[in-house]
Structures are given as structure tokens and as C-alpha cells.
Image (tube, rainbow, N blue to C red):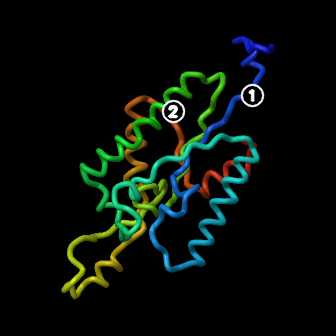
Amino acid sequence: MYTITNTSYKNIMKQKIVFVSHCFFNDAAKLKNPNLFELEKERTNKRKFLKKILDQGIEIVQLPCPELILYGVNRWGHAASQFNTAFFRKASRKMLEPYILQIEEYSSCPERFEILGIVGIDGSPSCGVKFTYDGEWGGEFTGNENVLSVLSGLQKVEKSGIFIKVMKDMLMEKGYEIPFYSLEDFEKISSRKKL
């Protein structure tokens, strides 16, 4: 029988771990998108990313989708400010709590594990890392003569989505400095150096 001693771990390579937004594995959680070309392009990019990191032996932890959990599959698209509410932030904290505990556990054994980062989906009102979309959205659709001008007021803004912002805050409260990446940024980093 082979037993591993504490000194044996020093000779084993660290297991590398990355946390990813839910829709990396489950596109069904995303909004209905009539633009099939756009949807397929994003799906292809995510699958290439996943294959690459799996081929490198990186472990993957899938985060929950707050939009699916709170609003279901028939939800409309939202602006980030519509999720920036006390309820959404509290619900996000509750969803993220077990993942923060996992990070805490992995971090307690730095000789065995290395958390490479958290990868989100830029543009998402929940999981955007570098940017999201926001605008003065809200109100009733029916009878509103300005619906098109309200919808066209959505703008790209350089800030995180609300779910990612809550996760950043929770990690900061615990004193963890774990990098957050957009899919594109993580791919650039992993292309330059073997993770």
C-alpha cells in the first residue's frame, strides 16, 4: 500500500484552479437570443477556452447564475443598475458564500493548490469583469411612447457586473487578492505563459 506523507506533497505539482461564470458550461442559463450567429460565436469561444484549460490540467469550479436563479429562463435583458439593489446584492452574497468558503479552504493549503483567478463574461450585468451595460431602464412597456429611446440609451460602461462586484467585495473583506479576468484577458495571459 502506498501512503503519501506530508513531505511527498512538496514533490507534487500544485493543482491549479479557476472559477468561471455559470454559462461557460451552461448556455441554457443565458437569455433567449434571436441572433444565432452571435450566440454560436460566444459558445465556440467559451468551448475553446474550456478545452484549453482542461488540456492544461486546470481544475474548474462553476459559479451559479444569479439571473437564472432569481428571474428564470423567460427574463428580459437587464441593465446593471437594475440588479444594483439591496435584494440582488444580498441574494448574490448568499449564493456566493459556499464558493468563498471553497476559496478559503483551497487557500489554506498553498503547497497543494493555486487559485489562478475568476473568469467572467464581459458585457453581462451580473458577471461582467471589465465592462457591463447600463442605462436608465425601468418602467412599463405598454403605453410608453419612448420605449425605443429608453432601450437605445443602454451604454457600455467600464465597471463590473453586480454579481462579480459582490464577489470582489466578499473576497476583499476576507483579505484575498484573487485576480478577476474577462475571457479575452485570461486567454491572453494563458497564451503568453503556461499556467
Occupied quadrant, residue 112 = top right
Instruction: Give residue 13's mark.
Output: 1
Query: Percent from the top left, x then y, of residue 74?
Result: 38, 69
Query: Percent from the top left, x then y, of residue 61?
Result: 57, 43
Occupied quadrant, residue 68 = bottom left
Q: Kindly state the secondary structure of the residue where label 1 is placed.
A: loop
The kind of residue on which mark 2 rests is Ile
Residue at image mark 2: 103
Q: Are marks 1 and 2 in contact (CB under 8 Å)?
A: no
Q: Residue at x 63, y 29 (%)?
A: 113
Name the quarter where the C terminus is drawn: top right
Crowding at mark 2 (Cα within 10 Å: few <14, some 14-19, many 20+): some
Left/right of residue 60 with respect to residue 100 in the rendered view = right
The kind of residue on which mark 1 rests is Met
Q: Residue at x 39, y 43 (%)?
A: 95
Count of marks placed on residues? 2
Is 137 above or below relative to 159?
A: below
| Outermost residue toward the left in this view | 143
| Outermost residue toward the front in this view | 1
Tell which of 6 and 132 is nearer to you.
6
Instruction: Give residue 52's mark.
Output: none
Q: Kindly state the secondary structure of the residue where label 2 is placed.
A: helix
Left/right of residue 122 with respect to residue 66 in the rendered view = right
Query: Percent from the top left, x then y, of residue 20?
Result: 55, 49
Tell which of 185 and 84 is nearer to you.
84
